[in-house]
């Protein structure tokens, strides 16, 4: 069974500016951990997140829900300029699909 902190969204990437790998957590965007190896960067950010969660719990503060645990409706609204809207409607009509299907296909790429 996964530990609570393992359910968060972690990522390791190279930081050219720092000349090191940086560990990140999507649910805690202000946190990062620098290290010379990607494995150490991941271990570091996971340990940092665990410490922050412990502090939040001690202080009775809210803890971010892991993105993987959230339920999504599949609906969101996007505002675009009228000419973009018109162009998408035309593309959808020419493809014989709905605007929703056309937008979903474009966003899925």
Image (cartoon, rainbow, N blue to C red):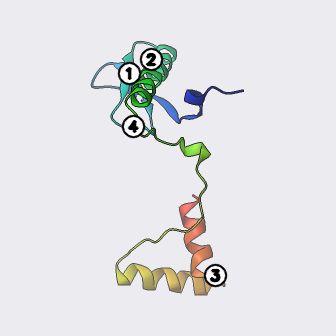
State the mark number for residue 44: 2
Q: Earlier in the sequence, mark 1 or mark 2?
A: 1
Residue that appears at 62% across and 82% down: 98
Quadrant location of the C terminus in the rendered image: bottom right
Q: Position of residue 24 (x, y in %)?
A: 43, 30
Q: Quadrant of residue 55?
A: top left
User: Mark 4–mark 2 contact, CB under 8 Å?
Assistant: no
- Secondary structure beneath label 1: strand
Q: Is residue 66 above or below residue 56?
A: below
Query: In whole angstroms, how far apart are the C-alphas of marks 4 and 1?
Result: 23 Å
State the mark number for residue 33: 1
- Secondary structure beneath label 3: helix
Query: In whole angstroms, how far apart are the C-alphas of marks 3 and 4?
Result: 50 Å
Query: In whole angstroms, how far apart are the C-alphas of marks 3 and 2?
Result: 49 Å
Q: Is residue 15 above or below residue 92?
A: above
Q: Position of residue 92 (x, y in %)?
A: 58, 82
Q: Which residue is mark 3?
A: 95
What is the crowding at mark 4: few (fewer than 14 residues within 10 Å), some, or many (at least 20)?
few
């Amino acid at each position: 069974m996964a530990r609570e902190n393992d359910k968060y969204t972690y990522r390791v990437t190279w930081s050219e500016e720092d000349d090191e790998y940086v560990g990140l957590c999507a649910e805690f965007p202000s946190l990062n951990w620098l290290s010379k190896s990607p494995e150490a960067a991941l271990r570091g950010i996971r340990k940092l997140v665990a410490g922050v969660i412990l502090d939040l719990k001690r202080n009775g503060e809210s803890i971010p829900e892991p993105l993987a645990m959230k339920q999504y409706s599949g609906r969101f609204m996007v505002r675009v300029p009228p000419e973009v809207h018109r162009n998408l409607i035309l593309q959808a009509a020419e493809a014989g699909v709905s605007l929703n299907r056309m937008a979903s296909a474009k966003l899925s790429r």
